[in-house]
Structure formats: C-alpha cells, structure tokens
Amino acid sequence: MPSKVFRTGVTAAALAAAVVSAVVSVPTIASAAPPAAPTRADDFNGDGYADVAFAAPSATVNGKAKAGYVAVMYGSATGLKAASKQVFDQDTAGIPDTAEVGDTFGGSVSTADLDRDGYADLVVGAIGEDNGTLSNAGSLSVIWGGAKGLSGGATLATGEEEYDAVGSLTKAGDFDGDGAADVVTIAGSHHVRVLSGPFGRDGSARATAEIRDMNDLRFLDTAAADVNGDGTTDLVAVVNDGEEFDARRILYWRGTSQGLAPASTVNGANGRSIQGGEHLATGDVNKDGFADIVAGRAVDGYDSDLDTPLHKGGMVTYVPGSATGPQGARTKVFNQDSPGVPGTAEAGVDAFGFSVSVNDMNGDGYGDIAIGVPSEALGTLKAAGTVAILRGAAGGPTGTKAQGFNQDTPLIGGAAEAGDRFGGAVKLVDTNGDGRSELVVGAPGENAGAGSVWVLPGTKAGITATGSFTFGAGTLGTVAPGAALGASFNR
C-alpha cells in the first residue's frame, strides 16, 4: 500500500481541548418506574439468558436493495435456539418508517433497557435513511423487549443535516450514573449525540445533547464501559484526526453525574498518543474489576507504521483500565507474529483485528479476546478468513494457549472458500448461563455475499468446534443475495 499524507492543523492537546463546544438540553417525557431487579443489557425476554442480534444492513427487503434487517435468536439453557428466531425490518408491523432502497437498517445495533420495564430493548441505526429532502440523514429506532420477546418500536432520533448518518456507531450505557440507560450515536462522522434516559414508549428521551466542533476528527468505532470502576459508564472511541503520523488514536470520555466529561487522549509511556485502530471492544481482561480497552487496527502500510513495529498484517492493542481511567503506559500490542498467536503476519492482506470482542470463554474470570482476521488466506484461498482467541490473564492478554478457527477446522460446518471473510464480525457471549461464553462468528462474504453465522460453544478448556452450528438466510427466511449476513452483532 502506498504511503499517504493527510492535511491537518490539530495537535493532540488541541483535539482534547476542543472536543466540547456546545451542549443543548431539551426536556422531554420521563418513563416508567425502574424494575425490581437489574436487567441484563442483552436479555430481551427477561428469562435470564443473553440473546443475540445479527445485522444484515445490505439485505434486500421486499425488493428494496440495501434496505436492511436485523435478526434475533434467544438464549436458553442449551444456548441459542434457531427456532426462536425473529427478523425485523422497516416493513415489520410496529417498526417505524418503511423499507426503502439504501436505508441500511441495522447499520449499528446496541442493547439496553431504555424504558426501565425490566426487559432489554434493541436499538437499531438506519444510517442511509432520508429525512424528507435530506439524503442519508439517518435515523435511530428502538424495538421494545417484553416477556414474549421483541415487538413494536419507536423512533429515537433522526438526522438533521444531509449525510448526518445518525444511527452509526451506536452504544448504550449509563453515562450520567442516574440508573437509567442513555444512548450515544455519531452524527456526520464527527459529532457525538447523547440521548439521556429514561425513555418514553414514544421514543422520547429525557434530554438530548451534542458534542460538536470536532475539527478534522473522524470516528471509526466506539465502545461503552466502566473503565475507571466508579459505577458510571464511560465512552471510548477510536478516531482518525487526519494527521498521518498519528492517524489512529484513542479518546476517552469519563462518565460523571453531569454526563460525559471532556475527552482526553490515551497516551503511551512516552507521553505521545498510542496508535489505536478502526475497531473497539471492552471487557475485564486482567480480572482487576476495571473494564479494559482492546483496539483492532486491521489496516497497515501507512507512514505512521514506521513507529509501530507490530503493524504488519494488522494488530491489536490492549489498554488496561484503572481507577484513574485508561493506563496507556501499560499497553500491550499483538499481531500474528507475536508468540503463540495463530498464523503468520503478512503485510497488507490479513486484516488482523478487523473485529474484536471480549468475554470469558472458559469461566476462569478473565476476559478473553476474540479477533477476526477476515482477509487471511488459507493456502490459495484469498480472504477465506480466520478467528484467533487470546486468553486473558493477570498481566493482560497472552498468546499462551491461544486458539485459531476457520471453516476448514474439523467439525465446523461449511468449507473455506475465497472471499468468505470468516471473522468479519465476532462476538463472545454466554447464551446458556453456564459462565462460559460462546463464540459467534460472521462470514459476510459466504455464498457470494449472502453471508452466514457460526456459533461455537465455550468450555473449561476454551472454545470448541464440537457442537458448533451455522445458519444463514435459509434459516431466517430472508433474501440471501448480497445480504452480507454476519457483518455485525449487537454490542
């Protein structure tokens, strides 16, 4: 890949200082009383098991190309049940708006109990939605959880400018510590829009705010987690500020009783901002009670890589959390040439870190890291794709006992083919309540772009292909061509 030079006039200090320029609050309607017990953020039917949403924003719906849909499977004592599937698009009864060409419903998917009724709700972005004459203004909607599962919905927000693409990079959490879930979405790739809960059943938020004037900054991914352990959700983002030498950086907004504090840049031991990436996950990898940050940088070959020895083929950066926030000085970086990590780093082709997820796969209390490598070649099969699993430990992630899976792994359904992009999305989630997370893998390129999803069980020894299963459009009853099912999951 040729070197690239970008124009910028923003330094790291100026970037952090300029993040907040305008906050506008609009009172709206409060909602129901809080539930008697805490709600799992991903339990839509309240049965105590985690459920999983699978997005296909490129799917054709009722003849409308790229209208998009989101499918859900419910957890149980035996894990995800294919028979429990539900599929939602904008032509589904009770879902706001109508399916149109290019809406990309499912462009982002998150979960939280927005109305505090004891059931998690599904938050869905449609980043290509038009708002009147405003092209690609975007929209954000909710599908309500309940004892019988998801049904009905409301609009949470719409874009106010052309190409606002509201509904992108959506995350939920309690950013002001009041016990009600809030929603953060990105508008125009540059602005943070915060919708404060609780929400009314009409989708109205208690208040809205926007963090603007982000200069050349462009959001690549976001994550929500309690990095400093104070009980309030913090916001983390990987961004590109246009400066080639520092093209990828990590920003951190601390959650407070007044909402998100001004952003700070996560710096390394040398005092300079650490290289971030394009993809984010959070979880307690070292079991110290603080959420840690994991950034995947799948793209290599830039001038900024001259100071990043492990950039080759993509890399994953681990930043531990602490009572004072992210500890950039204790960063650890991995690529496929790191000891124990499956595969071999190849410049410009692997995309190691294209997707990342953190959860405990073996029940030892440490968060393990699933890493998608969707451009990995298997022999002569280009971009067949693989997934690597790094184990969590007291010192952070380690390549010791690392695992690797692809479609040619024995007992995994299907067969590796060029362009499958197995690992295009990954999610570690405990859907059967045994304390060990299953690995959910998307291959959006499977079957000439139709896409498919795999589920691999978690055991005391780690992830296993034994008992794994796969499904696609045939199981869901959706249109297959071009859907790219498995491009993302709820986060």
Image (cartoon, grey):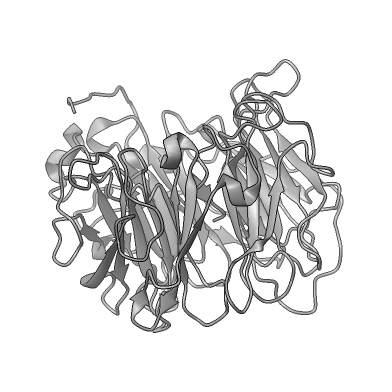
277, above or below 491, in the image: above
> In front: 263, or 52?
52
Q: Residue at x 64, y 29 (%)?
A: 103
The image shows residue 487 at horizontal and vertical percentages of 48, 44
Question: Residue 466 versus residue 174: which sits nearer the camera?
Answer: 466
Q: Is residue 109 visible?
A: no
Query: Which residue is rendered at x = 40% and y = 38% of the image?
Result: 15
| Residue drawn at point x = 26 percent, y = 76 percent | 395
Task: Give the image location of residue 331, x and y in percent.
Answer: 26, 62
Q: Which residue occupies the foreground of this view, 287 or 93?
A: 93
- Please tell me in which quadrant of the rendered image residue 447 appears: top left
Residue 104: quadrant of the picture: top right
Question: Quadrant of the image for the C terminus?
Answer: bottom right
- On screen, 380 above or below 98? below
Q: Is residue 203 left or right of residue 393?
A: right
State left or right for residue 102 relative to residue 466: right
Percent across and percent down for residue 449 are 46, 36
Decide if residue 52 is in sight here. yes
Residue at 28 percent of width and 44 percent of height: 351
Query: In the image as oriented, which residue stretches furthest toward the top?
Result: 133
Quarter placement of the N terminus: top left
Number of numbered discs overlaid on the protein picture: 0
Asked if residue 254 lies left or right of residue 74, the reply is left
The percent position of residue 220, horizontal first and vertical second, equals: 43, 40
Decide: is 113 above or below 220: below
